[in-house]
Amino acid sequence: AAERALAPIGESAPIRLVLPPAAKWYQAAITGGLGAITRLFNLLRRLAAQLKDANQVNQYFKKFLKIYLLAFDLRRLHSAHFGVTPEGTNPDGGIPVVPKSGIDQAEDAVIEAYVAMVMKLTETQLLQVFLAAIQWASLLHSTNTPANKKRKTDERKGGESGTETLVKADPKRTVTVLRVACHLERKLGPIFTPYLGHVAEHVVMALGYMEGSVKKGGGKRGRKRKAASNSEDNDNEEFSGECVPRDMARAAVAVLKEWVINDPDHTFDKTRLNRFCNPLVDLLERALEWSKDDTEYQVFVDNELAPCLVAVCAHLEDNNLWKTLNHAVMTKGESPHAKVRCSAVGIIKSFYDKIGEEFLVLLPETVPFISERMEDPDENVEAATQELIAVVEKLSGEDLDSYLR
């Protein structure tokens, strides 16, 4: 009812009357929880849709942006106001999915409103507001350093600085800015893809992020309680269902997947692969540290990490680059954790499923991996390896027994 009552305001009320008090409404909406935040930013999304011409856009977009940058801090400052939803299932198959936390849903409402504004902007303005979000998330070199001067020059050109160093970025803000980038990429596709270079260092940071809060206790796995000085932040995370390393990993994986499926100009090239490959594949083991149980780990690998790796592989279209990725995954066959070994076998199988006969060029170096996993002490790994063999034999039309002897 409240949503229906607010809809006409967003659709027809003058922007000049609604926008100024929105920041005050935001502070009140925080305490109102998910419903209040969603209603407020749905209102702002409708308000942005009223922007009809360049004059209106120029007049108001910075005022909209100010509110959105304020609200982007929901995750960092106010996640305790939002709970975590129960774990869901796929309605068509009952397959578990990663539960979507209240803070994810609240942040989605903010980002969708931000994207509605972005859709009204010119390319120059789009770059401006996206860089504003990145700078909000990052603390970079001081403005007087040569590296930062070069970064600003490259930003004006619409590219990324090859010498830029991410000195410090708040972890929770990094999650948010990567989720912003992912939403924009899904909405704008190849138009936005070149801009993803600006978050490359945030992706690297997110993939390799380790937190001093990983615990071994309270179940098979979990996060151990932080020191007393950080207890308030820890309580905030536990109440909201947050786990920063997990959230960073998921955000980075989502960005990389969208990047490669919307990249006709191949901005994701050999240099980018070398930058991202190992930390991305390392998530096969690192996810064990923040998964609360085996189900959460497997759901993350099957639904998010493996599809990302397969999308990267399909995008590369180069035998040598396939070899780099294939080798990185095969190294996980030596993991002491059976779940990791089994996942590695499954991903290699997915490479062959996706690429087809062309991927057989890597069969000679894959055979030792298959042979070792055939003798794996874990029956699930051995069964997964039999499935891999079946796919390879179907593609090659040959029996692999002679190769495996």
Image: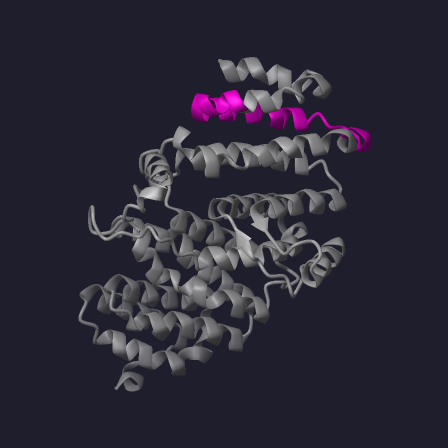
Residue nearest the viewer, comparing 177 with 43: 177
- The x and y percentages for residue 182 are 55, 47
Do we see residue 260 in this rendering? no
User: Residue placed at 66% from the left, 56% from the top?
Assistant: 194
**Quadrant of residue 90 within the rendered picture:** top left
- The x and y percentages for residue 35 are 45, 23
Colour logic: one colour
Q: Which residues are magenta?
A: 27-56
- The x and y percentages for residue 81 are 41, 28
Q: Is residue 132 above or below residue 375?
A: above
Q: How many callouts does the rendering have?
A: 0
Image side of residue 393 versus residue 312, left or right:
left
Q: Is residue 187 above or below residue 12?
A: below
Q: Is residue 244 above or below residue 356?
A: above
Residue 35 in magenta stretch? yes
Residue most toward the right? 55
Image side of residue 295 versus residue 37, left or right:
left
Q: Is residue 353 above or below residue 302?
A: below
Residue 73 in magenta stretch? no
**Quadrant of residue 278 within the rendered picture:** bottom left
Q: Which secondary structure is most common in the magenta stretch?
A: helix
Assign the C terminus to one quadrant of the image.
Answer: bottom left
User: Residue placed at 45% from the left, 37% from the top?
Assistant: 104
Do we see residue 213 in this rendering? yes
- The x and y percentages for residue 142 are 66, 54
User: Residue placed at 58% from the left, 54% from the top?
Assistant: 199
Residue most toward the front? 229
User: Residue placed at 47% from the left, 32% from the top?
Assistant: 106
Image side of residue 49 versus residue 321, left or right:
right
Residue nearest the viewer, comparing 178 with 393: 178
